[in-house]
């Protein structure tokens, strides 16, 4: 069984998006949280903020590093996950579930075609780990 949910799409910057209609729920992958280590702080945008594809929308800080989080597709933030802001360790415990970061209204659905499937993402991180 895959670590990465098949119904999600992935970026090479290690974000995922679950698409439902014109809405997308965005988070960081299990691989990303593992690389970061213990997450201690999360900064998210405000509802109503607009982001372009690959634009940074927030940061995740761990005991090791601070990492930018990038928007997988263009859109407007319609919800943020306050649970993660108050309990950043959720990212380490459930990166593909309760630790989602933002929900966006997807502005350009065609951009989804540029993202990776679960299988393609797993291949990408295998190659990245081999380098």
Image: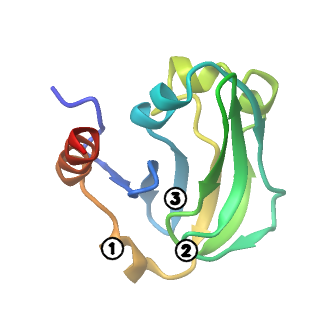
Q: Residues within 10 Å of mark 1 (few under 14, many from 20)?
A: few
Q: Secondary structure at mark 2?
A: loop
Which residue is label 3 attached to?
A: 24
Closer to viewer: mark 2 or mark 3: 2
* Nearest to the observer: residue 130 or residue 42: 130
Residue 53's label in the rendered image is 2
Q: Residue 21 sits in which quadrant?
A: bottom left
Work out whether mark 2 precedes mark 3 in sequence or the reverse, and give the earlier one.
3
Where's the N terminus, which quadrant? top left
Work out whether mark 1 precedes mark 2 in sequence or the reverse, and give the earlier one.
2
Residue drawn 25% across and 45% down?
Answer: 131
Q: Is residue 102 above or below residue 104?
A: above
Q: Are marks 2 and 3 in contact (CB under 8 Å)?
A: no
Q: Is residue 89 left or right of residue 6?
A: right
Q: Is residue 35 left or right of residue 42?
A: left
How far apart are the two marked residues, 1 and 2, measured between alpha carbons?
10 Å
Q: Secondary structure at mark 3?
A: strand
Which residue is label 1 attached to?
A: 114
Residue drawn 58% across and 63% down?
Answer: 71
Residue 78, percent from left and from top: 72, 60
Residue 16's label in the rendered image is none
Residue 28, percent from left and from top: 51, 42
Q: Is residue 85 above or below residue 77?
A: above
Q: Are marks 1 and 2 in contact (CB under 8 Å)?
A: yes
Q: Is residue 108 above or below residue 16?
A: below
How far apart are the two marked residues, 2 and 3, measured between alpha carbons?
13 Å
Work out whether mark 3 precedes mark 1 in sequence or the reverse, and give the earlier one.
3
Residue 14, percent from left and from top: 44, 48
């Amino acid at each position: 069984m895959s670590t990465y949910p098949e119904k999600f799409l992935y970026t090479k910057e290690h974000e995922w998006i679950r698409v439902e209609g014109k809405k997308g729920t965005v988070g960081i992958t299990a691989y990303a949280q593992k690389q970061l280590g213990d997450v201690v702080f999360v900064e998210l945008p405000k509802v109503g903020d607009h982001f372009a594809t690959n634009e940074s929308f927030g940061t995740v800080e761990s005991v090791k590093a601070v990492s930018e989080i990038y928007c997988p597709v263009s859109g407007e933030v319609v919800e943020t996950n306050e649970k993660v802001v108050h309990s950043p360790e959720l990212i380490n415990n459930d990166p593909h579930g309760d630790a989602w970061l933002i929900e966006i209204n997807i502005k350009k659905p065609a951009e989804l075609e540029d993202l990776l499937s679960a299988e393609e993402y797993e291949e990408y991180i295998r190659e990245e780990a081999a380098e």
